[in-house]
Amino acid sequence: MKKILGVLSLAFLMFSCDDGDIVVTDFAIEDADLDVCGLDEKVIFAVNNDGVYESISLILDATGPINDTVNGALISEIGDHQFNLSSNNRLIYRIYDGPIDSDYFCSSVPPSTPRVIQEFISGDAGTVTISVAYTDNLEETADTDGDGVPNYLEGYDPNLSDAEMLDTDGDGIPDYLDIDDDGDNVLTEDEINPEEGSWEEFDFLDTDGDGTPDYLDPDDDGDGALTRNEVNGNDLANLDEGQYLNPLNYDQQDGIPDYLNSEFQRNFDNPTYIQNEIQRSVVTEVTISGFSLRDSDGNSPDINTNIAFEMGSFTSSFTIIYERNVNNEEEEEETEVE
């Protein structure tokens, strides 16, 4: 990684004001690949050990708008989030007498080495913008829900909201995020059975030959009983929390599930549903505008900026549970940041 700030007198395009302060008009850096400490520390940082041992870090208020401990994320909501630099939200630049690593920022007790030679800390001026965007729906062949059907075959359109996109079973979850597109309690990935390289021909399994592939057909064998209801209701009492009655587990002949055999029919009103849990990937970009830096020892003039400093970005993934809702009121819960 290139120098973040370098030796201060060389790293900026700057000029001095009459009051002795330094005004920065440009940082001689590129966007950094940022690292992040856990939710307790909430530190975003980048280090450079090439020639000059230095770091730049953003220490965030653990009780502020970025405190998403419920969802286990720095910020889980997609979009732009702004807050001001302050005594609690601080930007810090440091020069050290030796190389540094992530332990320096992420340990509950910072190591005694390397030693800080010079430190500049932000004041109350400045605005931090943290922008969060999904990255798992950008590629043409992306399969966001991992069900084996690419987004482009599931009605994904980046110009539409999730509520406006194709939702085959009407459960409030668009198909590109739904691991059971037809709501029949058989995973989409277990119903498609495409031949190798057959996506363009839409060669999906269609058991009853009605022209609707099984993964979109609520009655796969066309016997008049919904696939999700071709289960044994006596098993309902034995289910643990989060389990569901899966039609794949019920057959009366030759190992063929009843929901694929029109000669055998069950019809229990199945109240259970597959929990729609998928992985989402995001990129988080950090930009800081209009800030100033002050030498913590008071030996150097203040550094003021009139630029938008693009600190850098980092990627992360979340386990998200999209709640199925027959009233089309979609809810979602995010957990387990990786």
Image (cartoon, rainbow, N blue to C red):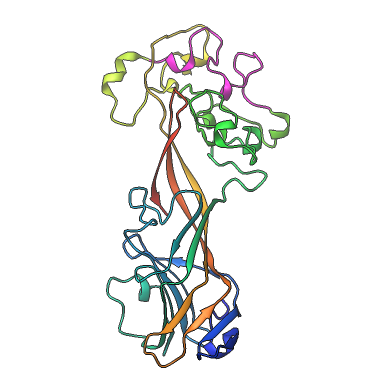
Q: Is residue 163 above or below residue 300?
A: above
Q: Residue furthest bottom?
A: 299
Q: Position of residue 326 (x, y in %)?
A: 44, 22
Residue 133 position within the rendered picture, expressed as x and y whole percent measured from the top left: 54, 52
Q: Which region of the structure is painted magenta?
A: 203-231
Residue 94 x %, y %: 43, 83
Examine the rendering and report whether any part of residue 58 can be seen.
yes
- What secondary structure is the magenta-colored segment mainly? loop
Residue 215 lies in the magenta stretch = yes
The N terminus, quarter of image: bottom right
Q: 281 or 7: which is nearer to us?
A: 7
Whether residue 99 is visible here, answered yes or no, is no
Residue extending furthest toward the front: 18
| Most foreground residue, 7 or 231 | 7
Q: Residue furthest right?
A: 201
Query: x, y percentage for residue 222?
Result: 56, 10
**Residue drawn at point x = 33 percent, y = 14 percent:** 233
Q: Is residue 159 left or right of residue 295?
A: right
Q: Nearer the viewer, residue 107 or 290?
A: 290
Residue at the spot x=37%, y=48% of the render? Answer: 71
Looking at the image, residue 197 sits to the left or right of residue 305; the answer is right
Q: Place residue 115 in its image quadrant.
A: bottom left
